[in-house]
Amino acid sequence: MAEIETTRDGAVLTIILNRPDVLNAFTAEMHRQFLGAFKEAREPEVRAVVLTGAGRGFCVGQDLNEFKEAARDIAGRLRRHYHPTVLAVRQLEKPARPPARASPSPAPATSGSPPTTPPSSPPSSTSGSFRTWAAPTTFADCSAPRAHSSSWRPAAA
């Protein structure tokens, strides 16, 4: 079983972290596979990238069990494995985001109480090296070319 899996749906590439038993903690091999997935993400046919994790959590970060083997060279391991992974995400000139969360269903209205409605858009934030922003829940319009801006800023909260 691959630790990083990819699927394509039209112009959308989905990258799945696949170590659910350890909350998708990254290993050196997983870093290598992730870089390969981002090579695929740079193909011109791919217009957007969805990053997700198998199981109940996206990713807890680096699997620290690997650092037991090389406790004296943690900085070297970070430079060889972790830094190229972060740079691959940061240098991708396409939208890279987690899957859109489903809006909560409105609560049923009861007599005498005002109706409730779900939020109008998903939350916006920055999380580590992954860029997220308020966006539509589909990539249906990904076939149209878009200009890339190197001066990206997170959406206002």
Image: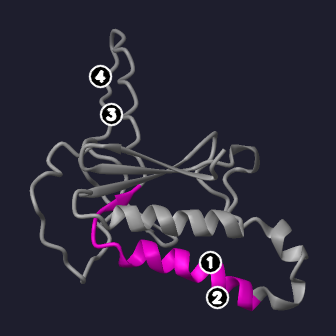
Q: Residue at x 30, y 23 (%)?
A: 114
Mark 4 is surrounded, within 10 Å at the Cα level, by few (under 14), some (14 to 19) or many (20 or more) other residues, namely few
Q: Range of the magenta residues?
A: 75-97
**Quadrant for the C terminus in the image:** bottom left
Q: Secondary structure at mark 4?
A: loop
Q: Nearer the viewer, residue 107 or 1?
A: 1
Kind of residue sitting beneath label 3: Pro
Report the mark closest to the observer, 3 or 2: 2
**Quadrant for the N terminus in the image:** top right
Q: Position of residue 118 (x, y in %)?
A: 32, 33
Q: Residue at x 18, y 42 (%)?
A: 140
> What whole-number distance in Å separates the C-alpha atoms at marks 4 and 3?
10 Å
Up-down relation of residue 130 to residue 73 (above or below)? above
Residue linked to disc 1: 82
Query: Mark 2 touching mark 4, by CB under 8 A?
Result: no
Kind of residue sitting beneath label 4: Pro
Residue linked to disc 3: 118
Query: Mark 2 touching mark 1, by CB under 8 A?
Result: yes
Q: Nearer the viewer, residue 108 or 62?
A: 62
Q: If you read the primary sequence from the N terminus, does the residue marked by circle 4 or circle 1 appear first?
A: 1
Please say whether residue 92 is one of the residues in the magenta stretch. yes
